[in-house]
């Protein structure tokens, strides 16, 4: 990828610029917890967006996307927004830096990536973080702090790409560190690194490639359930709620709200349990928590679907140590913690069995926890 980027940069813009990269991400555990003031537990992966960038002395940005094979040129004022979707990520990052008082001047860039698009690994956050990190280094003496870089990516999604996302993806992409996951407290925004060196295991993503479009805004409904229960408990969020407290109001709330809140309370505890297990190098417990999360997402929170439950069942049957839905649900990926010796068999079987049942093969990605945003070289 690096060689290709350098070759094309040279053809299009001449002499070499500087190479930067940022990563996609996984979330090991902690689902639907962000808007409940709980914890998420992401890490950056060995799939990246890489860009070669050089100031061009003008007030124009000229950028070429190798993967989409498309070129965009735009100015740096609000009315200069490009029409291509992919270019709006780059433009948005420039504008969000400017809005915060940062400097962005004209530059030339060529970029490519190997984060699968729309597979739940957050290629968009990788793209935003790569450019945010680069422009901070190139024009701002790295004066913008890393949290602000993540927020710049998040605001780009909100204001230029129509995606109302949380902060986790950009946080993971910016802060990622090889061999570490990060527990982010979505209430205080404090974070802590935990070692993740699953010797003897691999992380495997299985993308069902289905996305069920649901009519009645299921995400909003889940949120509303959580808010209702929190209110009943006299709390802002379910963050500090316990099962004892929930059980004490069980008769005052609907069964549906009860099970939604139960999942959130248990999921918060599972993140903490996984952190303890990682500190003890106990990957069996990590895996058991992943299965428990799947069960909760499927039965209590009801955001799974037939295909994801099938993937989870196959993993369990084959002896995969941990498996669960990753992401909001209703389609997308499962994340699996697989023993090395089972890896090839698992991938083969899951592909065949899924295809037999649903008519198409799932996509499978091996991931390794790696560094986030960085300068690759001068
Ligand atoms: P994801 O879950 O992967 O973040 P999104 O729909 O949020 O999916 O973001 C995907 C979008 O990000 C693409 O449609 C494209 O505009 C942009 N993008 C991601 N990767 C690349 C790439 N390698 N080259 C060009 N654009 C990319
Ligand atoms: Mg995205």
Image (cartoon, rainbow, N blue to C red):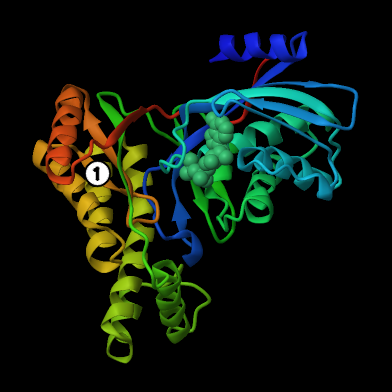
Residue 163, above or below 14: below
Which residue is at 24% across, 44% downward?
Answer: 323
Q: Residues within 10 Å of mark 1 (few under 14, many from 20)?
A: many
Which residue is at 70% across, 9% downward?
Answer: 11
Residue 263: percent from left, percent from top: 31, 66
Question: Which quarter of the rendered picture does the C terminus lie within?
Answer: top right
Residue 138: percent from left, percent from top: 80, 26
Q: Is mark 1 within 8 Å of ligand 1?
A: no
Q: Indicate left or right for 217 with 21 as reference.
A: left
Q: Residue furthest bottom?
A: 252
Q: Indicate left or right for 94 with 66 as reference.
A: right
Residue 154: percent from left, percent from top: 63, 50
Q: Nearer the viewer, residue 275 or 357?
A: 357
Q: Nearer the viewer, residue 250 or 118?
A: 118
Q: Indicate left or right for 20 with 96 as reference.
A: left
Residue 110, above or below 338: above
How many badges with numbers are in the image? 1
Q: Is residue 100 visible?
A: no
Which residue is identified by label 1? Answer: 323
Residue 353 appears in which quarter of the rendering? top left
Q: Nearer the viewer, residue 153 or 233?
A: 153
Residue 74: percent from left, percent from top: 79, 36
Q: Is residue 137 visible?
A: yes
Q: Indicate left or right for 193 with 161 as reference.
A: left
Which residue is at 49% across, 59% downward?
Answer: 34
Q: Secondary structure at mark 1?
A: strand
Q: Residue furthest left?
A: 317
């Amino acid at each position: 990828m690096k060689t290709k980027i350098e070759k094309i940069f040279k053809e299009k813009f001449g002499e070499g610029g500087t190479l930067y990269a940022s990563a996609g991400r996984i979330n090991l555990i902690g689902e639907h917890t962000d808007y409940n003031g709980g914890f998420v537990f992401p890490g950056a992966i060995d799939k990246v967006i890489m860009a070669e960038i050089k100031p061009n002395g003008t007030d124009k940005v000229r950028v070429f996307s190798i993967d989409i094979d498309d070129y965009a040129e735009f100015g740096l004022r609000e009315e200069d927004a490009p029409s291509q979707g992919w270019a709006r990520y780059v433009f948005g990052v420039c504008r969000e830096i400017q809005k915060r008082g940062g400097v962005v001047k004209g530059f030339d860039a060529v970029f490519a990536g190997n984060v699968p698009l729309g597979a739940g690994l957050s290629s968009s956050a990788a793209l935003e973080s790569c450019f945010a990190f680069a422009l901070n280094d190139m024009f701002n003496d790295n004066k913008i702090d890393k949290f602000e870089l993540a927020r710049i990516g998040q605001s780009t999604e909100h204001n230029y790409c129509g995606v109302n996302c949380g902060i986790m993806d950009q946080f993971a992409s910016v802060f990622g560190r090889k061999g570490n996951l990060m527990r982010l407290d979505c209430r205080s925004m404090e974070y802590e690194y935990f070692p993740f060196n699953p010797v003897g295991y691999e992380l495997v993503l299985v993308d069902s490639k289905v996305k069920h479009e649901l009519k009645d805004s299921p995400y909003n409904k889940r949120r509303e359930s959580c808010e209702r229960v929190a209110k009943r408990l006299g709390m802002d969020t379910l963050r500090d709620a316990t099962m004892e407290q929930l059980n004490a109001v069980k008769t005052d709330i609907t069964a549906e709200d009860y099970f939604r809140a139960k999942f959130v309370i248990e999921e918060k505890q599972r993140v903490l349990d996984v952190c303890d297990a990682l500190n003890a190098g106990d990957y069996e417990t990590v895996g058991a928590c992943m299965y428990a999360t799947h069960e909760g997402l499927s039965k209590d929170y009801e955001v799974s679907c037939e295909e994801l439950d099938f993937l989870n069942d196959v993993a369990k049957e084959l002896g995969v140590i941990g498996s669960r839905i990753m992401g909001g649900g209703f389609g997308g990926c499962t994340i699996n913690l697989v023993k090395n010796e089972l890896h090839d068999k698992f991938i083969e079987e899951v592909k065949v069995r899924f295809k037999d049942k649903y008519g198409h093969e799932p996509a499978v990605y091996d991931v390794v926890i790696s560094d986030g945003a960085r300068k690759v070289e001068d």
